[in-house]
Image (tube, rainbow, N blue to C red):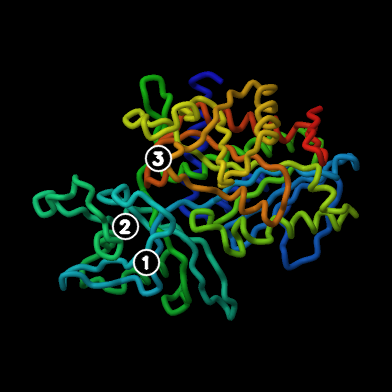
Amino acid sequence: MTAAENRAATERLIAFIEKSPTAFHAVAAAAQMLEEKGFRRLRESERWTLEAGGKYYVTRNQSSVIAFAVPEREEARHSFLIAASHTDSPTYKLKSEAETEACGRYIKLNVEGYGGMIAPSWMDRPLSLAGRAVIRKEGVIEARLVKIDRDLVLIPNVAVHQNRSINNGYNYNPAVDLMPLFAEKERKGALKKLLAAELDCAEEDILGADLFLYNRTKGTVWGAADEFYSCPRIDNLQCAYTTLCGFLDAVCAGETRSVPVWAAFDNEETGSATKQGAHSQFLWDTLERYADAFGIRLPEALASSFMVSADNGHARHPNHPELSDAQNAPNMNGGVVIKSNAAQKYTTDAVSAAVFGEICRRAGVPVQVFANRSDMAGGGTLGSISNTHVALPTVDIGLAQLAMHSSYETGGTADTGYMTDAMKAFYRSGLRFSDDGVCSLD
């Protein structure tokens, strides 16, 4: 891709991210993309009628989604090619009773951390609220998405004159330092009024809400040759978006030789152990219902299937290269990253790495490798967790980025296209596994 094409692809990614301040909104944005390509929504509470050539998706909790397409050819329906990512990012969540007075003058919002964020990156910048609210309407309890699309709150730092240790490893206390300023005292109760106006309902009809802070700073492309971009929630909406784009490209071209499956789970940042997380039965339930519809034995189908777990990784840092492994450190704009870990925090083994690397090679997509320094513990992701429920050969991949878990992260503009192309090639591949680790790539 040319520099102009990389910029255009990245701007489309940024637009998707800006539509997706929370996992709920990310699923809604993905569902819109799926429906525009002819996918039909299924509901877990209803019987599924699936047809050859059909394209379907199903959501859980409004914050996780799985999509799949049924091949026209019967012989292609007996194995799966799956890509899984996640929809959530570290942030702060409002507590049920959120408004609290400060100094007899102000109203703050009482929040708690969701995931492992870089706390100072949330300070001294415009923030707002988004999520879902539960309302009572005509005798029915209804969950609605809400996004307050204006600068609403801010977490103020303490001046250096009053906190001389601020630049010497200051330890932020989330119960003290990270409470956002919302209003003056006279406007107590303004939060519920604001929500009622957004939802077009009476205050007393708001029964509850899952509301999160989001960074209002717009995404931007920058660098001497537009080679970088910065945006909130790159981890992991970049992987969610690019794997979806590759999935849609392959499905709409009619070039799949297995059942293509795209999944995006919630709650990876807090361990995945929820009904909508990768540690749930959501993926198994979906594949089982597909298999039942076509008389396929799911364990046998999984034995010849393959999964990609897509979650971004750490790029070599220009100011701190010593924090990366000397030989296994990727760079932004260097292509798709294959991640491995001896303690099995990643699912990658020699076979799965070789298979996916060969798919990328044939597609002309550059590949890098990542491993942590041996004296540093790294994070895990959803691949190993999902494999405890749906066991199949899996590789952990991602794209290299800086400032992971900051409220404003940085990546390379070429990498969006690389991942999209890699995933399109993955879904088009005639990949088949055997029990002894041999794989054919027709």
Q: Name the residue rendered at 42%, 30% in the picture.
A: 316
Q: Residue furthest front?
A: 375
Front in this rendered view, residue 38 or 83 = 83
Front in this rendered view, residue 253 or 284 = 284
Disc 1 crowd, CA 10 A, few/some/many (<14, 14-19, 20+): few
Disc 3 crowd, CA 10 A, few/some/many (<14, 14-19, 20+): some
Tell us which disc is closer to us: 1 or 3.
3
Q: Name the residue rendered at 36%, 56% in the picture.
A: 128
Secondary element under disc 1, as helix, strand or loop, is helix
Q: Quadrant of residue 441?
A: top right
Which quadrant of the figure contains the N terminus?
A: top right
What separation in Å lies between label 1 and label 2 (alpha carbons)? 10 Å
Q: Are marks 1 and 2 in contact (CB under 8 Å)?
A: yes
Q: Which mark is residue 152?
A: 2
Q: Name the residue rendered at 44%, 56% in the picture.
A: 115
Circle 1: residue type: Leu
- The residue that disc 1 covers is 194
| Residue 206 spot, x, y in % from top left | 46, 74
Disc 2 crowd, CA 10 A, few/some/many (<14, 14-19, 20+): some
Query: In the picture shown, does residue 171 fall above or below 105?
Result: above
- The residue that disc 3 covers is 409
Query: In the picture shown, does residue 141 fall above or below 118?
Result: below
Circle 2: residue type: Leu
Q: Are marks 3 and 2 in contact (CB under 8 Å)?
A: no
Q: Are marks 1 and 3 in contact (CB under 8 Å)?
A: no
| Residue 294 spot, x, y in % from top left | 88, 53
Left or right of residue 326, residue 28 in this image? right
